[in-house]
Amino acid sequence: MTTQLLRLLPARLLRALGYHQAHTDPAGLNAELEDNRVAARAAQPADLAKALPRLAVLLDFQPGLVDLHRDQVDTAAYLNTLAAAAESNLNLSDPDHHALYWDLIAAARAAEDLERAVATAATRTLPTTELQHI
């Protein structure tokens, strides 16, 4: 029962409160990762239907892109922090530790790439004037 209630809270809040829901078996971890994907995909049609009528001009896209950029900045920073912790605290001569470290580095770089792509998209929502075209 407690585990089910804890799943309702954001992961970041749980970590801040000292709760760590680490899995010890691949099946449990894979099930949770898949649940995350399924939940996000299940919400997508409703979110899209709600957003479509409001996204009629370039400027309408900007608030969502700015929010997404903020999330990506947080994600990239979090992954870089995890990579730094792995570098400092793990035995990188152990192949599993070494692999985790490099997976975290790759994930942080991917998050930074996505952050830049979202920022580029957000800048395209700015109004243009005739003066800017000269």
Image (cartoon, rainbow, N blue to C red):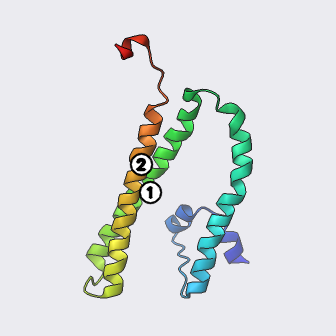
Callout 1, which amino acid?
A: Thr
Mark 1–mark 2 distance (CA, rounded to whole Å): 9 Å
Callout 2, which amino acid?
A: Glu
Asked whether 34 or 15 is in front, the reply is: 34
Tell me whether circle 1 and circle 2 mark residues in contact (CB < 8 Å). yes
Across and down, in percent, residue 42 comes to 72, 59
Asked whether 15 or 82 is in front, the reply is: 82
Residue visible at 71% across and 55% down in the picture: 43
Using the image, tell me which numbered label, if any, was put on residue 84. none
Nearer the observer: mark 1 or 2; the answer is: 2
Across and down, in percent, residue 2 comes to 69, 76
Q: Quadrant of residue 54?
A: top right
Placement of the N terminus among the 4 image quadrants? bottom right
Residue visible at 38% across and 11% down in the picture: 131
Q: Which residue is mark 2?
A: 115
Using the image, tell me which numbered label, if any, was put on residue 75. 1
* Label 1 vs 2, first from the N-terminus: 1
**Left or right position of 60 against 102:** right
**Left or right position of 28 against 117:** right
Residue density around tag 1, few if under 14, some if 14–19, many if 20 or more, within 10 Å = some
